[in-house]
Structure formats: structure tokens, C-alpha cells
Image (spheres, rainbow, N blue to C red):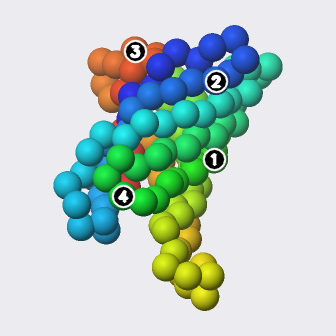
Amino acid sequence: MTISAVNEVGQFSGLYLTAVSAAGKPIRVSPMNGAQHVDNLEQPTFGFTVKWSFSDSTTVFVGQCFVDDHGEETLQTMWLLREKAKSAENNWNATLVGTDVFTRLKGQNVGESMRSDL
């Protein structure tokens, strides 16, 4: 994912390119929007939504940024992916849950790319 700069109220946007999909269509870059707490810039909590460009699904991520003793950042997240259900009877089958940990790509600056280590 590529994240833009966080504004003064904690909002950000960016682009997300996943490596996995069950949609059966070619994977494309998808838009994302989110927010983080700006009152505590050390290890803030955050959330963001990805509206997939190649399927009828949306994923929401929530998590926290952690910085270790060596200054390495990780974004540790839990996510819910909601697929379009065919009917109300299939409602529970349309939601998946999982976790991802993102790390900054070497040589990238704040506001640039992060990647998921699945």
C-alpha cells in the first residue's frame, strides 16, 4: 500500500495492491481511506477501508503502529472483508476475518509504501 501524508486531523488516503484474491478477476490497484489518532504520535491506533476495484467487496482494517527499540515500524492489523451476499440467508458466509502485519519498504520515506508480510 502507498499512504499519503496524514493531515492535521489524522485523515489519510492512498492506494492498495493486494497479492491475493478469490474474485476470479485480474487484481488491480484499489483506493483506500483512513484515519489515525494524532494526539499521540507514538504508536498510534488507526483504521482504513479498501474499496476493491476488481470485486464487489470491501475490507476494513484496524490496528496500531508499533516501533521497536531499533526504530523499525510495523502496522499490526485485524481486518474484515465483506463480499456481496446473494441473499440474507448467506449473510454470515459473506464476511471473512484475518490479520496482517505491514512493514515499511527499505528506502521508503514516511507517506510512501508499506507491505504486508503474510
Q: Nearer the viewer, residue 26 or 18?
A: 26
User: Which residue is drawn at the image coordinates 58% and 55% (left, top)?
Assistant: 78
The kind of secondary structure element at disc 1 is: strand
Foreground disc of the pair 3, 2? 2
What is the crowding at mark 1: few (fewer than 14 residues within 10 Å), some, or many (at least 20)? some
Foreground disc of the pair 4, 3? 4
Q: Position of residue 40 (x, y in %)?
A: 77, 22
Q: Which residue is mark 1?
A: 62
Q: Which residue is mark 4?
A: 55
Q: Which residue is mark 3?
A: 109
Name above or below for residue 52 compared with residue 37: below
Q: CA distance from mark 4 to mark 1?
A: 21 Å
User: Which residue is drawn at the image coordinates 24% and 51% (left, top)?
Assistant: 27
Q: CA distance from mark 3 to mark 2?
A: 18 Å
Q: Where, by quadrant of the figure, is residue 113 drawn?
A: top left
User: Which residue is drawn at the image coordinates 43% and 36% (left, top)?
Assistant: 31
Task: Tell me which amino acid carries mark 1.
Answer: Val
Say which mark, if any, is on residue 11: 2
What is the crowding at mark 3: few (fewer than 14 residues within 10 Å), some, or many (at least 20)? few
Task: Tell me which amino acid carries mark 3.
Answer: Asn
The kind of secondary structure element at disc 4 is: loop
Task: Tell me which amino acid carries mark 4.
Answer: Ser
Q: CA distance from mark 4 to mark 3?
A: 31 Å
Q: Is residue 65 visible?
A: no
State which tag comes first along the sequence, 4 or 1.
Answer: 4
Name above or below for residue 78 compared with residue 8: below
Q: Position of residue 100 (x, y in %)?
A: 48, 53
Q: CA distance from mark 3 to mark 1?
A: 22 Å
Q: Is residue 110 visible?
A: yes
